[in-house]
Image: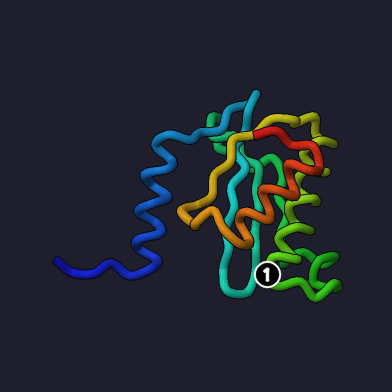
């Protein structure tokens, strides 16, 4: 049996998770992706296959703050995505950790989004 690469193992975990988690118009999915350099968060309606809103460290405003892939940046992205969701009349979401462990950046983003008013 060959050993899976970290990326393939994460994708496998994500596929397993996506069988249970899906976003709808009423309760969209908050998807998180973390790379070595950046953090991305999207609110997705899976029924319409449409991204409703997004926030990441790649955005111009975030690049000016010199944000990267760390817990401090994850907190800022979590607050930002929650503010955008609440402005778009979205209060409830389902959380999709993207196959990443619920620890560090992913946990910090989720906690910040909860504190800013999102429910999941």
Front residue of this view, candidates 51 and 66: 66
Q: Residue at x 69, y 65 (%)?
A: 71
Residue where numbered disc 1 is placed: 70
Classify the position of the C terminus by image quarter: top right
Q: Residue furthest left?
A: 1
Classify the position of the N terminus by image quarter: bottom left
**At which x and y percent is residue 11?**
39, 56
Element type at mark 1? loop
**At which x and y percent is residue 55?**
73, 54
Front residue of this view, candidates 20 and 47: 20
Left or right of 61, for residue 12: left
**At which x and y percent is residue 46?**
54, 34
Query: Image quarter for residue 7?
Result: bottom left
Front residue of this view, candidates 66 and 72: 72
Left or right of 5, for residue 47: right
**Above or below 3: residue 81:** above
Q: Residue at x 71, y 50 (%)?
A: 54
């Amino acid at each position: 049996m060959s050993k899976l690469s970290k990326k393939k193992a994460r994708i496998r975990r994500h596929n397993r998770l996506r069988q249970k988690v899906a976003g709808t118009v009423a309760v969209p999915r908050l998807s998180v992706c973390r790379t070595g350099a950046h953090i991305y968060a999207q609110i997705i309606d899976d029924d319409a296959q449409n991204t409703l809103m997004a926030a990441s460290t790649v955005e111009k405003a975030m690049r000016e703050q010199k944000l990267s892939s760390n817990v401090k940046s994850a907190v800022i992205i979590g607050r930002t995505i929650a503010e955008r969701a609440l402005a778009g009349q979205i209060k409830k979401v389902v959380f999709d950790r993207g196959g990443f462990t619920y620890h560090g950046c992913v946990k910090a983003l989720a906690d910040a989004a909860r504190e800013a008013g999102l429910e999941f």
